[in-house]
Image (cartoon, helix red, strand yellow):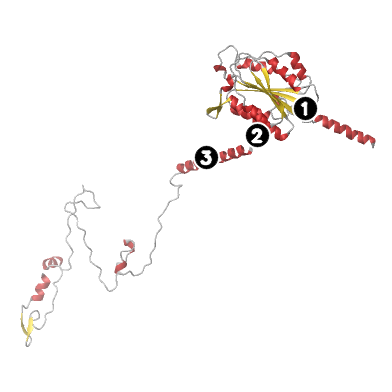
Amino acid sequence: MDSLTDDFNDSRMEHERAIPKTQRERIIFCIDLDLSMDDYFMTGEKMNDTRINRTKQLLKWFIEQKSSWNAGHEFAIMILGEMAVWHMDFTSDTVLLSHAIDELYTMGKFSAFDTTSLFKEILDQSNIDEDDGSVVRAIMVYARSDVLPSEPDLEVTDALYSSRRFYYDCIYIHNKVTEVSGPIKPQHVYDRLTEMEDARSPGYYYELTRVLKKFSTAMGELLAHPAVRPIQDEVSSILAAPPSVRRMEELALQKQLQQEHQLLLQEQSSHETPSQQPLSTPKRQDHPATFKSPDNTGVGSPSQKSTIQFGTRPPPSVPTSRPLGSPTPLRSPSAPPLSPQPALSSFVSSKERERLGQPRAKVERSNSGTSSGSGGGNGAGSGSGTGMDDAILI
């Protein structure tokens, strides 16, 4: 039984050693107040905010985030000119820290920076020799593109790093190489800043020009506790976007896919052949074959009108008058005019009848010779006797 208890205690101790405890942090902000901090950051396509203003906003955001996780975290402020100056002591009062950050402004153009003064002030003010269960962090924001910091004193830096409770991180904001005319380039400055790192407490280093997003990303990564974060060169993951940004990206992607789908449908419809397109035939309106009164004969198409009307005689067709010399509607103007045709008649002359060999029609006469005259008295009358025969021959 005792052996099982000992094995359990040993495994628990190994587990506790494998997972480091997140200790209370005492963070020192080392802010450069050179005139280069008045240069502008690029926000989208516009440059409308200075480096110092953005630094203030990110510092206050950083303090709020860390304090919400652990109210015991403390923060201090140092300002950098030609030397480092201790500006505000450690405190966990977020309101007091916010007022102190708002009072930071650039102080002038500095041609040098003493790095040893920075680490010496940290060593004196942080009481790093007292093991109170906390870690000391220094986050430096440096913005001089052509001012090379001095080499730090190794004795001072060794006193800090030997405690295994000190971590140093740096954000270097600089101009483009083409904008620096002196012999000292931003690469030289960055190399000097990285020389302050110690293998016993590896730090995070960032360099950026006018891209504001990279500055925000760097401050977000520095929120992690230095005892549990991986080495910077081994970090391959990217910080996930917040839910609101992801939602906007999803909506933009859906809108883009819908537009592409509509364009594809339009291209397909424009490339279709006439045989593939459905033929639209007019809908036929069938009318019942019933008798229509003369009042309703104007309704419907001409082919559907009834030409027979009971009890009435169809009206004669009215010839359409056309100006003399005008061309026939169904013929071209250059075609020769048609020869007029004789009108058909129900009566045939005697000469025509003799030519056709038809016998002369016989007409029965009345016994009374006065059939065509005016009658009177006893049937005697006056008139021509051959009136009927002459009327037929006319």
Q: Earlier in the sequence, mark 1 or mark 3?
A: 1
Between residues 352 and 331, which one lies in front from this camera angle?
A: 331
Q: Residues within 10 Å of mark 3 (few under 14, many from 20)?
A: few
Q: What residue is at 76 percent from the left and 29 percent from the top?
A: 24
Q: Earlier in the sequence, mark 2 or mark 1?
A: 1
Between residues 193 and 281, which one lies in front from this camera angle?
A: 193
Q: Which residue is mark 3?
A: 260
SS label for mark 3: helix
Q: Residues within 10 Å of mark 2 (few under 14, many from 20)?
A: few
Q: Residue furthest left?
A: 382
Asked if residue 170 lies left or right of residue 266, the reply is right
Cα distance in 3D space between marks 2 and 1: 29 Å
Q: Which residue is mark 2?
A: 240
Q: Which residue is mark 1?
A: 134
Q: Amino acid at mark 1?
A: Ser
Asked if residue 180 lies left or right of residue 134, the reply is left
To which quarter of the image does residue 18 belong? top right
Asked if residue 196 lies left or right of residue 296, the reply is right
SS label for mark 2: loop
Between residues 378 and 114, which one lies in front from this camera angle?
A: 114
Q: Earlier in the sequence, mark 3 or mark 2?
A: 2
Q: Amino acid at mark 3?
A: Glu
SS label for mark 1: strand
List x then y, in percent, for residue 275. Answer: 44, 47
- Answer above or below: position of 234 versus 364: above
List x then y, in percent, for residue 273. Answer: 44, 44
Between residues 36 and 313, which one lies in front from this camera angle?
A: 36
- Answer above or below: position of 62 versus 160: below
- Which image quarter is the N terminus in? top right
